[in-house]
Amino acid sequence: MNGNRIRLSVVASTNLYTTQLLGQCVIDEFTLVSAQFQEQGKGQRGKSWQSNAGENMLSSLVFLPKIKVKNQFLVSAATALSLIELLQNYGLIAQIKWPNDILVKGKKIAGILIENQIKGEKIESSVIGVGLNVNQSLFDAFDWEATSISIETKSAINVEEFIVAWQQLAEEKLRFWIQNSAALIDAFNRKLFLKNKTVKFLFHENELEGEIIGVGDDGALKMKVQGDVKSFVNGEIKLLNTSFE
């Protein structure tokens, strides 16, 4: 592997630590920062990511995608597919809940938070934050029920070995997917949770129904709503966790 490894016991946030480090010195691509515990773990749009100390993967990976800002969704999509492939090694079939959660049996097992450093029209570097439930067995109640590898496999997992496997797989797969964007979007849509299903969602605090069609090249979610195909960007809608057929 080309990337280095930085191990921390406690940190405010691996993404924050990694971003600050990037601003201070040169860091090799695919360097991975991991922590046993995050005091201020972050999810999308300011939400917190809760995790018991030492039981899960809390990590941030440095990636140099060399793509235009308008194509930034490709980094998230490539990360999601790589995590799905890694989970397959543990016998788990995972799906992507748009835009950046990984589910197993409809339960959340991982979340992705990517923070880009931009120069001109290009992404100079990406800090790919991944929180993935490995051995945790009890979770607080959220909109989406959580699970872990240990719960699903009924066995304890070596967290360190899992992190090493993630770093290695990311180095093998991220660049490949980024360079094959059409195949990437196609593969993403094949793993899209509730594709071709009618779901309920919130849009400007109004509850609506729509059929999920898929994700476009720009990462927008296409849905058929009241007979019309509409596209929604990240943060514009909230998928409701109702009973799904």
Image (cartoon, rainbow, N blue to C red):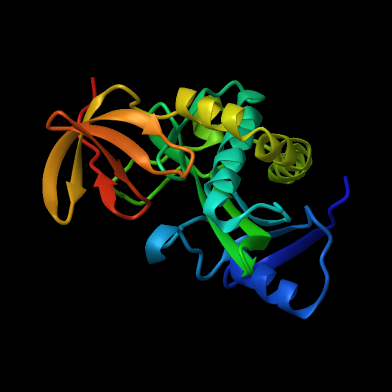
Q: Foreground: 49 or 2?
A: 2
Classify 41 as above or below 235.
Answer: below
Left or right for 140, reference 90: left
Name the quadrant of the N terminus.
top right
Task: Tally the marks.
Answer: 0
Residue lying furthest front? 121
- Regarding residue 84, the answer to whether it shows in the image is no
Residue 235 appears at what percent x and percent y? 34, 55
Residue at figure coordinates x 47%, y 22% from the top left: 190
Left or right for 37, reference 105: right
Q: Foreground: 172 or 91?
A: 172
Residue at figure coordinates x 74%, y 46% from the top left: 160
Q: Foreground: 245 or 188?
A: 188
Classify 79 as above or below 117.
Answer: above
Residue 68 appears at what percent x and percent y? 61, 55
Residue at figure coordinates x 67%, y 76% from the top left: 20
Q: Quadrant of residue 27?
A: bottom right
Residue 45 appears at what percent x and percent y? 39, 62
Q: Foreground: 222 or 78?
A: 222
Residue lying furthest right? 2
Residue at figure coordinates x 56%, y 49% from the top left: 71
Q: Quadrant of residue 86?
A: top right
Classify 61 as above or below 100.
Answer: below
Name the quadrant of the C terminus.
top left
Residue 135 appears at what percent x and percent y? 57, 41
- Regarding residue 106, the answer to whether it shows in the image is yes
